[in-house]
Every structure is written in C-alpha cells, then in structure tokens.
Image: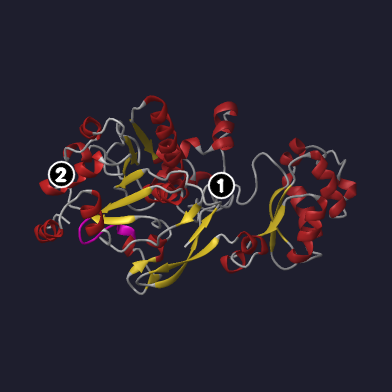
Amino acid sequence: MSQEGKNGLPPLQGIRVIDLTRIVAGPYCSMVLGDLGAEVIKVEQVKTGDESRAWGPPWLEKTVSAYFVCLNRNKKSLTLNLKHPQGAEIFRGLVRKSDVVLENFRPGTMDELGLGYEALQAINPRLVYCDITGYGNEGPYRDKPGVDVIVSAIGGFMSITGEPDGQPVKAGVALTDVLTGMYAFGSIASALLWREKTGRGQRISINLLAIQLATLINIGSNYLVGGILPRRWGSAHPNIVPYEAHKAKDDYIIFGVVNERMWKSFCQLLGMEEYEKDPRFSTNAERIVNREALYRIIDEKLAAKTVDEWIPLFDQAGIPAGPINTLDRVFKDPQVLYTQQVKEIEHPQYGKVKVVGPPVKFSESPVGIQSPPPLLGEHNREILTQILGYSPEEVEDFRNQGVI
C-alpha cells in the first residue's frame, strides 16, 4: 500500500460513501473519493456483483477482470438485495450513518424501491445524493441505456474522432464515462463543502450526454459561434497549424506550434527558414488555409532523423513534442518511472497487483491506496456487525434468506 504526503489526515477522512454504481463512471468517481480518504462501501448485486468483474480477459487468477481492478481500489464490498425488505432496511441503516449516496440506476429505480432522494433525505437531512444517468432524469431519452460509446456518438464526439477520409471511431478508452466520474467527484466534494456551511445535504444529478456536450470545448464553441460544422482531423488541430503527428525517419512524432515565436523556432529547427515569412505560412490563419502544402514540406524535413533524434532538438527549441508511445514504452518512460505513479498492491487472494495510482499529491494530506479491489461480498460481516451492530447470527440468517 502507498500514500503520498505527510502524516496528516486524508482530505476526506471521516466521510462515508454508499456506492451503488457499477461499470465505469460511478466506480471511477467513488474510487477517487476513496483515494482521498473516504470510506467507500460498494453495494453489489448478490452473487453476481458489478458486471465489470466479468469483463475479461485479462484476469487475475482467472477470477476477476483487470477492468474491475482499475476502478475499484479503496472500497469495501457489501452484497445486498435491495428488493428484499430486510435488504432495504439494512440500506436505510447505512444511510443514517453515511454522508454520500452515489447511484447510476435507470431513472426512477430508487424511487420504485422506496429509496429515492426524498425518502433518504427524510432520514438523513445532511445526505449528499448523486445520481448518474445516461441522458438525465427527464426528457425523451430518459429511459435510454447510458453507454459511453453511444453517448459519444449522439453527443458529437465520434463525429470528430478519426481520420479525415475515414470512418468515425471511438476514443481508445471510455472517456465520456471517466469525465462524468470526475465531474461527479467534484460535484460531491463541492456539496460536502456547502453542507459544512449550511448543515444541509442536497441532490446532484449528472448525465453522460450533458458531460459530453460540456467537454466539446473549442469544437462546440466553433460551431455555436461561427457555425462551423466540425470534421474529423485525425491527429491534426482545426484551429492551430502545425499541430499534429508526422512521420520521422522511423516512426511518428507529434508536436504543436502554438504561437508565432514557436513558428520561427520551428522553421529554424527544421532548416526551413525560407518559409517563415512565406505569405502562405507567415500567420497561423494562413497556415490553416494552406496546411496541406505545409505538411508536405514538414514531412520531407522530418524524414532526415529518427524520433529519438528529433525529440531532444524540439525540447531545446522549446517546442512541445513527444513520441507516440505504445504502452510498453509508456511504462518505461523516464518521467513515468520518476513519478512512481505505477503502484504495486498486495491482494489477499491474488498476490501482488500493479495498478496506476492516484494522479494527485497533497503537500500535507496523505493520498493513495489503502486497500486492493475487494472480493465480492468480502466485507459483509464487517459492515453489518461493526457499523450497523447486527450479530454474527443475524448476518448468517441474512445470508440464508438471500438478503446478502
């Protein structure tokens, strides 16, 4: 296990989160809350648990997927049948002793169970309740399943991802889910701060489509302001040239020339000084219009050296540049090795497991990995006896009834 920072209190120590979410967006949010010290109780379906447990290969010991591992550290697993009256009662008991409820059920599901925000707020007025949906709790898409790649298509992201003359493609990871998880985390943290000022909790509603639109940034703005219908640019940038990947002697290098000072340095670096004041390329606006002609010149110049030869020269010139690494090179990169972001955790059943750790450091507060991803129902007895005060005999009875 590892923690960064001094020996002070983790930022969210003392905050208890009931996490009803599964798949990616919600679990990513609750993992970040756990990284920052919150106690996260992951409530899972009896017998099957979070679907992502089965999203392999690759597997840990042919049992749990690497997918599940990357999203569920620093959590305790409680299997609980919310449709059973006793399961619902156990859940209410946890709500009374918790600060946050996070869920990503179909809109209306928690209300149907008698466990919606109004019912829970009545028993814990300080509760922060966050629901994550695909498209929102109202509207024509209310009951449409929220799947990252579908939302990225409906929300315009796929239309701008891919090669100019190719088909639309999805991002290499579930980026809309991850961004939604981060928005949810920030919103929950903000609501907890607001609670400290007012003494009251509140409901937060987040949906993937809204997050997708919010994160279109300049592409969305280009359309809303200029009526420009965006296209796919591959690795290129619609508003900055040159800013894309090009083939060097051996492989691809990507770089960005973001101002005219860099343009001058770029021309000197590639031995193309005669093009610095060329009216086709002298300003960024002209370079956008004439990008194809410029690309041909750049490709010819870059072919003289390998990527590893070019990178130090770009660095010396102050021009952002980097290789397009495959993951075997990523995890051997000197900066990645120096920051020690890859952590090794000890799992009670699977032994040592490597994960990418939290990407933030606090100067005073410890942040990090306190526990590995849990086994399904691993903490049933601990939660029910230590937090809610049930006896071991009652816990066994719950098990026999299918409550847990």
> Residue 261, position in %: x, y?
82, 41
Amino acid at dot 1: Phe
Look at mark 1 in the image and give the residue it sits on. Answer: 362
At a point 74% along the width and 64% down the height, the residue shown is 307
> Residue 52, position in %: x, y?
34, 59
**Could you tell me which secondary element the residue under label 1 belongs to?**
loop
In this rendering, the answer to whether 321 lies above or below 350 is: above
Question: Which disc is residue 89 wearing?
Answer: 2
> Residue 221, position in %: x, y?
57, 31
Say whether residue 347 is left or right of residue 3. left
Magenta-colored stretch includes residue 209? no
Name the foreground residue: 192 vs 60.
192
> Residue 267, position in %: x, y?
85, 49
Say whether residue 96 is left or right of residue 243. left
At a point 52% along the width and 38% down the height, the residue shown is 216
**The furthest residue to the top:** 198
Magenta-drawn segment: 45-52
Q: Tags 2 and 1 in contact by the CB under 8 Å rule?
A: no
